[in-house]
Image (cartoon, rainbow, N blue to C red):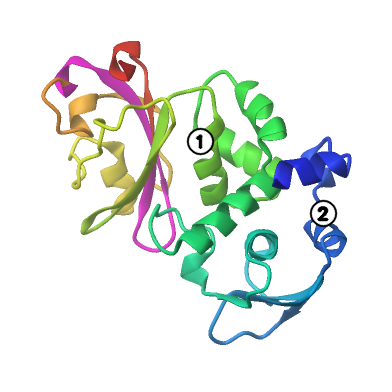
Amino acid sequence: MAEQLLQSLGVTTPGEIDVEAIAWEAGASVRYGALESCEARIIGYRDRAIITVRDGGDWRRRRFSIAHELGHWHFHRGRSSICRASEIGSPRQQGPALERQADGYAADLLMPAYLFRPMAAAYKRPSFEVVEALAKEFSTSRLATALRFVDLSPWPCLIVCHGPEGRRWFRRGPDIPTHWFPQNDLDPESSAMDVLYGKIGWSAPSLIGADAWFDRWNADRFNLVEQSVKGHGDEVFTLLTLTDGAMLD
């Protein structure tokens, strides 16, 4: 639905995605202000609504919050919605269905597949450098762009988040079988360990045995490419790319 809206507005490049103008077209005006208990909220009546977004912070986060509230306006009209920061753009595929639906709308609106997919495919290989380049093009955060990259890129990828206590969440691409489930603990040989514990902030893509990431009977037969970057606070994001087609069988 979000992509149909963009196409109806004649959007042909990422720079033309003016989320506040799109909100106005949808009948919602955007305001910024101090919000104590939430990141954003939408209050609507009939065909008009007001979206209020917490002022300050990362402007890319504010764009996603507006798009998220527009998702509520599209799917859940007639309800007032107050969204906490943890509910907007959450990488965890859990939580309230309404929030996940609004997040999906936001991703489609800010990084529409008809623009994102060919731009991602134009690169020779997947990496966080590519994610950063796409994030700049679409004015989205690294994390939101990385999640979209995993969903839409032509390569079989996963993104995994770890903290000191172990795996926090992961997202696998649509072509990767569900039996490839990342281990809870980081392997000592993985570059993610050096990023997590502050020795480096960003690792180069490197080849590693799949058994470093997956506790599966045949994982030692395969290699994959890993690259890790520092996330917020005490977390590390790792992009895994499956390089052997047999892993997709």
Q: Residue at x 49, y 31 (%)?
A: 127
Viewer-nearest residue: 226 or 30: 30
Q: Amino acid at mark 1?
A: Asp
Instruction: Residue under label 2, please give it.
Output: 18
Query: Which percent across, then down, holds residue 109?
Result: 70, 48
Q: Which residues are magenta?
A: 219-238
Q: Residue at x 64, y 59 (%)?
A: 75
Residue 161 appearing in the image = no
Up-down relation of residue 58 to residue 40 (above or below): above
Up-down relation of residue 152 to residue 100 (above or below): above
Distance in Å between CA atoms under marks 2 and 1: 23 Å
Q: Is residue 140 magenta?
A: no
Label annotation for residue 151: 1
Instruction: Report whether 129 appears left or right of 164.
Output: right
Q: Quadrant of residue 160?
A: top left
Q: Are circles 2 and 1 on residues that touch, CB within 8 Å? A: no
